[in-house]
Amino acid sequence: MTRRDIAIANFKSGYNCSQSIVLAFKDILPEDENTLSRLASSFGGGMGRLREVCGSVSGMFMVAGLLYGYGGPEQGKVKADHYARIQELAHRFEEKHGSIVCREILGLTVRHDAPVPEARTDAYYKKRPCTEIIGDAAEILEQYITEHPV
């Protein structure tokens, strides 16, 4: 299975969008699956269903931080280089989806959604492009990692 397939399968099994991405890369990350899942748990639905930054984008950023990030109160080039990496990932995602903001991608007018997620039914998957968005995010991140080996 590709990382795209794994991320989509994660989402369809009930993980949120952010968890789906992070767990698709768990084999190359320095943390255990439970820690990764808990770390990413707050970022689904555009950060706790606030419909802000897309959870799959947040997931990409978390994986990038674990693979390439810095661990101290860095200044200057180290921080700038990492932020440039994050901006590049965001740009690649924006090229495909026009935005990194959940509500804009989904065409929602609500800024802060109810905290209770919708049931994951066939109708849910038909009306929401989330599985494709998650798959695209996994592909973008996998391509970036291939281009920039750790």
Image (spheres, helix red, strand yellow):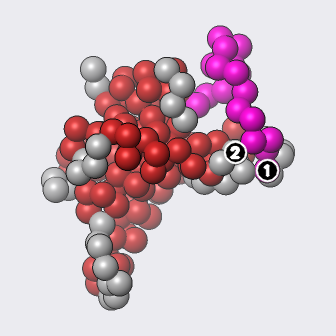
Callouts 2 and 1 close, C-beta under 8 Å: yes
Q: In the image, what residue occupies the spot 57% across and 49% down?
A: 42
Q: Magenta includes 124?
A: yes
Left/right placement of residue 46 relative to residue 148 reads: right
The residue at the point 28 percent across, 49 percent down is: 31
**10 Å neighbourhood of mark 1: few (<14), some, or many (≥20)?**
some
Residue 61: which quarter of the image?
Answer: bottom left
Residue under numbered circle 2? 49
Q: Is residue 113 above or below residue 2?
A: below
Residue at x-position 33% and y-position 39%: 33
The residue closer to the viewer here, 97 or 75, is: 75
Q: Mainly helix, strand or loop, the magenta region?
A: loop
Tell me the kind of residue under disc 2.
Answer: Arg
Q: Which stretch is magenta? A: 112-130
Instruction: Determine if the magenta segment contains residue 136.
Output: no
Residue drawn at the location 72% of the way across and 51% of the way down: 50
Tell me which amino acid carries mark 1: His
- In the rendered structure, find residue 112 and report the number of the disc placed on it: 1
84 sits to left or right of 113:
left
Q: Position of residue 4 (x, y in %)?
A: 37, 29
